[in-house]
């Protein structure tokens, strides 16, 4: 199942939602979220894509390399980045208990309502892309954006 070719209308809608979700979120924060969520979900396709995007955006290799252990490397991440990554981990691993109040409240204290909505949308979108890529068996190392 290769959505860009088999379901172009759905793909265009997802891309539009992706663009809208990225508005107002720094590229650094967006890529850190996308990398961490893709790691959690085990999506090699998206992880490869966003590691490449992080290199192109010249994110520090130390931060990219430590994003899986962001809580153990507070000197590499701002308070806002740590709050967003914590939120991303809990939204990705939602489970029956949802997002703990302490995690949501911390993010809400550091982002205004619009920013928090954009961070949440960024988290939701990469989770959606991960599920499409994993379920569709998209291979790591391929980037459909470069096929057009």
Image (spheres, helix red, strand yellow):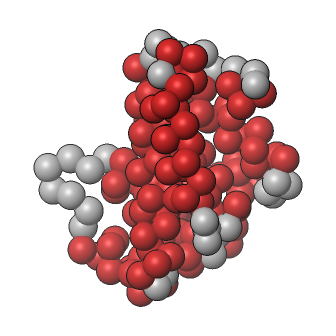
Residue 58 percent location from the top left of the image:
85, 55
| Quarter of the figure with residue 62 | bottom right
Q: Residue at x 41, y 86 (%)?
A: 109
- Which quarter of the figure has residue 140? top right
Q: Nearer the viewer, residue 77 or 119?
A: 119
**Depth order, front residue of 7/99:** 7
Q: In the image, residue 110 lies at what x, y percent?
A: 48, 84
**Of residues 24 and 57, the one drawn nearer to the viewer in this rendering:** 24
Q: Is residue 79 above or below residue 97?
A: below
Q: Residue at x 34, y 71 (%)?
A: 103
Residue 18 visible at all:
yes
Q: Position of residue 73 (x, y in %)?
A: 62, 64
Residue at 61% x, 35% y: name it.
47
Query: Is residue 30 toward the left or the right of residue 127 in the image?
Result: right
Q: How many marks?
A: 0
Residue at 26%, 50% (x, y): give it. Answer: 94
Q: Is the C terminus in the top left, top right, bottom left or bottom right quadrant?
A: top right
Is 131 displayed left or right of 35 in the figure?
A: left
Could you say which is closer to the camera, residue 10 or residue 24?
Answer: 10
Point out the residue furthest to the front here: 9
């Amino acid at each position: 199942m290769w959505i860009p070719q088999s379901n172009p209308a759905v793909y265009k809608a997802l891309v539009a939602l992706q663009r809208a979700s990225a508005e107002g979120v720094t590229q650094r924060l967006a890529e850190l979220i996308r990398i961490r969520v893709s790691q959690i979900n085990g999506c090699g396709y998206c992880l490869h894509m966003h590691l490449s995007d992080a290199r192109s955006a010249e994110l520090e290799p130390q931060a990219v390399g430590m994003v899986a252990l962001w809580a153990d490397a507070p000197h590499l991440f701002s308070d806002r980045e740590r709050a967003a990554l914590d939120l991303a981990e809990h939204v990705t691993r939602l489970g029956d208990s949802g997002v703990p109040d302490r995690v949501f409240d911390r993010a809400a204290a550091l982002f205004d309502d619009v920013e928090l909505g954009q961070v949440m949308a960024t988290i939701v979108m990469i989770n959606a892309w991960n599920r499409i890529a994993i379920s569709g068996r998209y291979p790591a190392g391929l980037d459909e954006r470069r096929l057009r």
